[in-house]
Amino acid sequence: MAKDYYKILGVTKTATEKDVKLAFRRLARRYHPDVNPGDKSAEARFKEINEAHEVLSDPEKRRKFDQYGDQWQDAQHFGGAGQWQQQTGRKPTVDFGDQGGEDLFEQLFRGFGRETFGKGTHRTSATETPVEITLEEAFNGASRILQLGDSKGVPHRLEVKIPPGVNTGSRVRIPGLDNKGEIFMVITVKPHQLFERQGDDLKAEVAIPLLVAVLGGEIEIPTLKGKVALKIPPETQNGKVFRLAGLGMPRAGNSLRGDLYARVGITLPTSLTEKEKELFHQLKALRSN
């Protein structure tokens, strides 16, 4: 059955690049294998969503898809697919030969980037290998050692650099193999215990003592660059959000950074002494007048 990438992402053919990106992020969060452990249908759906996003987010691939449908990649193998279709009245079809339409997901884990089309004819296509990283690695950049096979099946160990600023769904090209195809790492950024990521921004919950909230003061808050001082003004209310500019995630491809939004939660004192309780009674009396 022909694939409709627009339908897979739930967008129209007039969708902008931003619409495609938002739809992909929404669906990727819903069907990600980490969210649906052991669910094969979710895993297949996640793969399908990635495939649709890869095509529709690339203007040239999208143009070919709009012209040739889900067999856009094979147009070049028929001496001009538009002419071939015009002469025959049919879109080009693909013969998987002895592979019987083997699932590319299985090929991905073997590390090979080659499919067989017909008999004795080879065409390479983009394959993907999933890689998990921490939020700290996404912030600072990282590397992974991968063992992948070339066109002859010979394994190679490659160190692949992951640039700062990647997010779940980001694709990092793996260079250096002679299989004439493209191989990508598909990044998943694992959840963090302190920070919630929203695009290039980070959100965090920060606890502050009651007296600091009432009288004002300075507290230390964690960031991915280390602790920084945050000035708390007097009479700060519970739930107040402070914006720390430039302390969010790097933006891939440039030197800009997102922001960190710290939401304060006021902690009440415990194990009060009799003297402290008396002082609170006095404050209560004063506030009642």
Image (cartoon, helix red, strand yellow):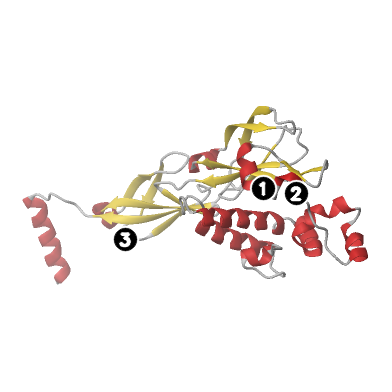
Callout 3 environment at 10 Å: few (<14), some (14 to 19), or many (20+)? some
Q: Which residue is mark 3?
A: 238
Mark 1 vs mark 2: which is more N-terminal? 2
Q: Are marks 1 and 2 in contact (CB under 8 Å)?
A: yes
Asked if residue 18 lies left or right of residue 190, the reply is right
Q: Nearer the viewer, residue 128 or 257?
A: 128
Mark 3 vs mark 2: which is more N-terminal? 2
**Mark 3: which amino acid?**
Asn
The CA span between labels 1 and 2 is 8 Å
Callout 2 environment at 10 Å: few (<14), some (14 to 19), or many (20+)? some
Element type at mark 2: loop
Q: Nearer the viewer, residue 17 or 95?
A: 95
Element type at mark 1: loop
Q: Is residue 225 above or below residue 72?
A: above
Q: Quarter of the image containing the C terminus?
A: bottom left
Q: Which residue is mark 1?
A: 102
The CA span between labels 3 and 2 is 62 Å
User: In the image, residue 135 lies at what x, y percent?
Assistant: 49, 43
Q: Is residue 43 above or below residue 286?
A: above
Q: Is residue 231 visible?
A: yes
User: In the image, residue 25 lies at what x, y percent?
Assistant: 57, 58
Q: Quarter of the image containing the N terminus?
A: bottom right
